[in-house]
Amino acid sequence: MASSTIVCGVCDLRRITKPSIIWCFECDEGLCSECKDHHSRSKGTRKHDTLPISEYQKIPRDIVKITDTCANHNEKFTFYCKKHDSLCCGSCIVENHMECRDFDKLTDVIQNTKLSNAFYEIEQSLEELSDNIHIIRKDRENNLGRLSKEKMQIEQAIKQTRITINTHLNKIQDDIIKKLNETEVNESKIISELLISLKENDREITEIRTKIENIKQHATDLQTFIAMKELEKRISSKDQFLQSMINSENLKHSDLTYNPNSAMQDLVNRIKNFGDVKIEEKPCKVVLKRRKDKQAQIMLPHILSRSVDTINLKLLQTINETGEYVRGCCMLPDGKMAFSDNSGRTVRVFNLNGTKNFEVNTRTFALDVAYISYDNTLAVTSGESDKKCITIIDIQSKQIKKTIPVKFAYCGIAVTNGKFICSTEGKGIQLINPNNNSTIDIVRDKIPTICYVALFDENIYHTNYKSNSVTCYDLQGTIQWTFKNEKVLRCPRGISVDNDGNVYVVGRSTNNVVVISADGQQYKEVATASDGLSNPISLDYNRNTNQLLVSNFSDKAFTFILI
């Protein structure tokens, strides 16, 4: 942290020692109360960015050292070179970046850095690292307990055997118990040393997370941006450490086993020992959490991706009386189906057999609906209602659990890690944290109302009915591909993704469902008006059952099975 006592920079030049009460980032010095008053009134400094000294002292020491001035040229950084991932002053560009063409204004790059998706990713990665350390620690602690329990069981078996023979076996009994103890102690020592290492890494992660909080609250955007790069390196290093531990020999499961000597019945002359004590090693079954590279999934069997050409749908059933103006639908894990009736301001839940289970009045327009697995609820957007909000419906109690007020008109919604990704009229695609109502812009674009989103792996999929297009973004908002073919798909609305990354989209004007390959290059029409589609508006793919729910705008919906 910064020094506990910071003297006023202006007074210090006058050989007067006064404690500072604020810190000016642009002047790069502290100011006492008198100098602060002059500083806030002077035309040249009145708009400078300042911070109370008590809060400035909470900024980590290495972050405080970051300045907005180039060390080589003593000029302020003004640009960011994307090619070299480098901050640049005017002289830097002349000397080293004349051939570069991809520059951004630094003020634009660092704007809202603390709320950026990249900074959010760092926080999530830290949380993931901490969770993974706890997972490994718990596994090793369980192994320690199991070794101790197995040791006691084997020792009891040895003693029970010893009771049946005479005192001649005392010596070899002592030998086998000694070997047992030594084996357990040696293996326990290895695991204990590993636990100590994990505990130290956990402590470092906790310190980094504390640093993150202080950076978010007190550091400048520039300091945050530069610190973010260093934090990414440290996080990557910790992640590599954990993965190397997973792959090492030290993380194999250790079990004490005992194999009694079959010749014990011959007793004194032929028996030289009780048996053998050794460690049996089994493959590690610890699975680390993975948000980016999904390396934890390498233990799962590989399933070949289904090609778009081989995808066919078979109609299972028709659901009637879903609503007069349905805007959204979703399938629940148990096979139930939910539909949002916009004009009726109602969400209706139907049973697996197509009969209505219950309905809830949302008190606002009901647009899209999505299932939240961790608490068995439904999230419903309100669009352009007078009361803009996201309504949470408890499926168990069949009542509204809470209402989350929002600033914008949200339509399409997808759920990830307890947070919402929403299509936002006139704004783009946003990530909403319902715990504190904070938002992060993922895609900034003046998109129209009633557009839909889907989420799969590390990609976001979005429909735009005005441009007749489907766009795939990564979680940072970078376009991966765009599909547009008005001959087969017009006015795309609802969107969902199967287990292979194939994208299903309803065409409201073309009365069909089109499946697009994971790379956006191939497509196939898999449902049409002949299947009952009439002005279809939304759909949802159930990845557990490989069923597709498609809803018309009025009254009817259909379930299909992938064949």
Image (cartoon, rainbow, N blue to C red):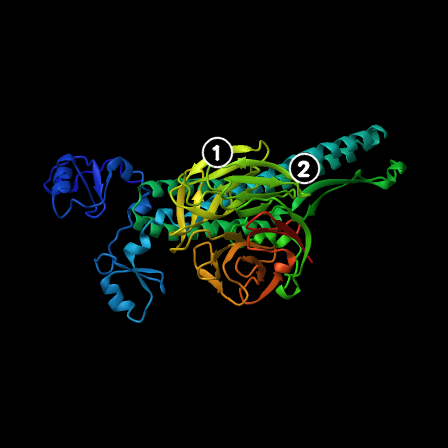
Q: Considering only order in the chain, which callout, 1 or 2, is on the residue closer to the N terminus?
A: 2
Local crowd size for mark 2, using a 10 Å CA cut-off: few (<14), some (14–19), many (≥20) = many
| Circle number at residue 402 | 1
Residue 351, quarter of the rendered image: top right
Q: Is residue 554 left or right of residue 124?
A: right
Rendered residue at 52%/46% (across/down)? 325
Q: Is residue 30 above or below residue 488?
A: above
Q: Amino acid at mark 1?
A: Lys
Please identify the quadrant where the C terminus is shown.
Answer: bottom right
Query: Is 515 rendered above or below residue 155?
Result: below
516 is higher (above) or lower (below) than 439: below
Residue reaching furthest to the right: 266
Q: Residue at x 9, y 41 (%)?
A: 14
Q: Residue at the spot x=87%, y=40% of the render?
A: 263
Q: What residue sits right under mark 2 in the picture? A: 147
Can residue 511 be seen by looking at this rendering? yes
Give the Cα distance between marks 2 and 1: 48 Å
For disc 1, the neighbor class at 10 Å (few under 14, some 14 to 19, many from 20) is few
The label nearer to you, 2 versus 1, is: 1
Task: Give the residue type at disc 2.
Answer: Leu
> Residue 314 or 141: which is nearer the viewer?
314
**Helix, strand or loop at mark 1:** strand
**Residue 535 at x, y percent in the picture:** 55, 55
User: Residue 337 appears at what percent x and percent y?
Assistant: 61, 44
Please state which of residues 137 and 182 is positioned toward the viewer in this rendering: 137
Nearest the camera: 502 or 530?
A: 530
